[in-house]
Amino acid sequence: MTAPPPRGGTATPGGFLRGLFDIAVRAAQPVHRMAQALPAPPRGRTVVLGAGKAAGAMVHALEALWPQDAPLSGLVVTRYGHTPPLPTGLPARIEIAEAAHPVPDAAGLQAAERMLALTHGLAADDLVLCLISGGGSALLTLPCEGLTLQDKQTLNRALLHSGATIAEMNCVRKHLSRIKGGHLAAACAPAQVVTLAISDVPGDDPAVIASGPTVPDDSTCADALAILTRYGITLPHAVQAALRRGDLETPKPGDPRLAGQQVHLLATPQQSLQAAAEAAGATGLAVYLLGDAIEGESRDVGRVHGAMARAVAQGRSSLQRPCVLLSGGETTVTVRRAEGPAPRGRGGRAGEFCMGVAEALQGQPGVWALAADTDGIDGMEDNAGAIVSPDTLARANALGLDLAGHQQRNDAYGFFSALGDLVVTGPTHTNVNDFRALLVL
């Protein structure tokens, strides 16, 4: 990758940022670090279970690395359309099911029921390999007693629109599930459980990734109830009462059923950001890594990043240009209630971030930005994210697009689609959270 020119040219600033994103995604593919994390085949059976947007790619990596003469079977579930093509000559010993995300559906429920059934009869000589990645919370749906699939769908929508952090959402999900929050690993006892995970959460806490189906949970029913109260989310009376009584508690640290379990992180947001930083630095640009665990309201985080880049461009910062600012993390979007005749918009965290950046930059010359979700899907749309350039607002004004109106409707998709500035990749078969890069020339 060569240093991008200030204006025009074949290696445009936007293309340069897209190249950094592609490097970050490649660094997060499961095949890179799986071999050193795999245990030896056991004396008994090896059963593979798992869920997440990267589950298909993780299965294919495992199939290629696991000895062909060693028995291997199991089931994982991934998002619709996120199963990569099976490499030529690779056996398909593990079933890959598909289900809905971010709102669960009946296919996810069926997959979770089948997965739990596969744990029956496991013995101490057996090995369970759990392939876990972001998105598993919605894909692995098995509601607690008294809660229906429709109830879980309503709950997921409310949580997604509430502005709750991923840790808060997953705390609630754990206590309303029969498979998350350590329940899956407990069901596997006395077999050995080895979890191979790809992190999409700030801090890389395995108990938060996909709501931690294979690790102990130190949160409580009281914590889950407090989160629901904080965001004004209600549950059926019987389930709410069960939370108050502590009847829906999860397996805790020290639970003997989870003793000796292993967890290996195959990819993290920091690793992907570091790969992008090294590529940018190799071009002679200064690189400032702002952190891999930045949280907060997406639009506000975008405003802060934009203000920082604008200060650098104007020489009002200790940071030196030309440079690249990189950050990761999982921000939130609080969906505003639609007012007036205009419908609620479309978009996700990356698009909301980019609207905040554009607002803060105010057309500042010499600054470009890209934000995209590393799984290739921003929210529920077909784009990974968007790009902001110095002429974004001028082109928007020429087209009659009102940035403030799009922000009010949470309509990042409509805004950047009209400008032709969506980043579209399709499913990337991995997921290490949001990637954000700002180029200051």
Image: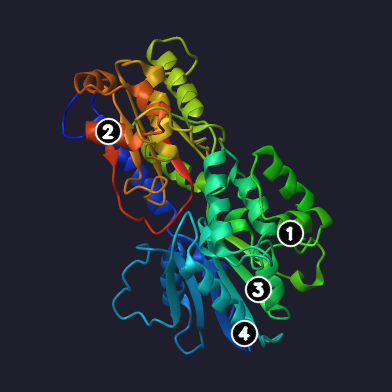
- Residue assigned mark 2: 14
Compared across the picture, whether 19 is left or right of 435 comes to: left
Q: Gap between marks 1 and 3, in whole Å? A: 33 Å
**Mark 4, mark 3: which one is toward the viewer?**
3
Sequence-first tag of 3 and 2 = 2
Residue at left offset 66%, top offset 47%: 234
Q: Which mark is residue 42?
A: 4
For the question of whether residue 60 can be seen, the reply is yes
Compared across the picture, whether 245 is left or right of 373 comes to: right
**Mark 1, mark 3: which one is toward the viewer?**
1
Task: Check disc 3 and report its element: helix, strand or loop.
Answer: strand
Residue 94: % across, % down = 46, 79
Q: Dividing the image into 4 quarters, which one contains the C terminus?
A: top left
The amino acid type of the residue labelled 4 equals Pro
Q: Dividing the image into 4 quarters, which one contains the N terminus?
A: top left
Q: In the rendered structure, are the residues bearing label 2 and label 4 in contact, judged by CB atoms less than 8 Å apart?
A: no
Residue at left offset 36%, top offset 34%: 412
Residue at left offset 57%, top offset 83%: 46
Q: Gap between marks 1 and 2, in whole Å? A: 53 Å
Sequence-first tag of 2 and 4 = 2
- Residues packed near mark 3 inside 10 Å, few (<14), some (14 to 19) or many (20 plus): many
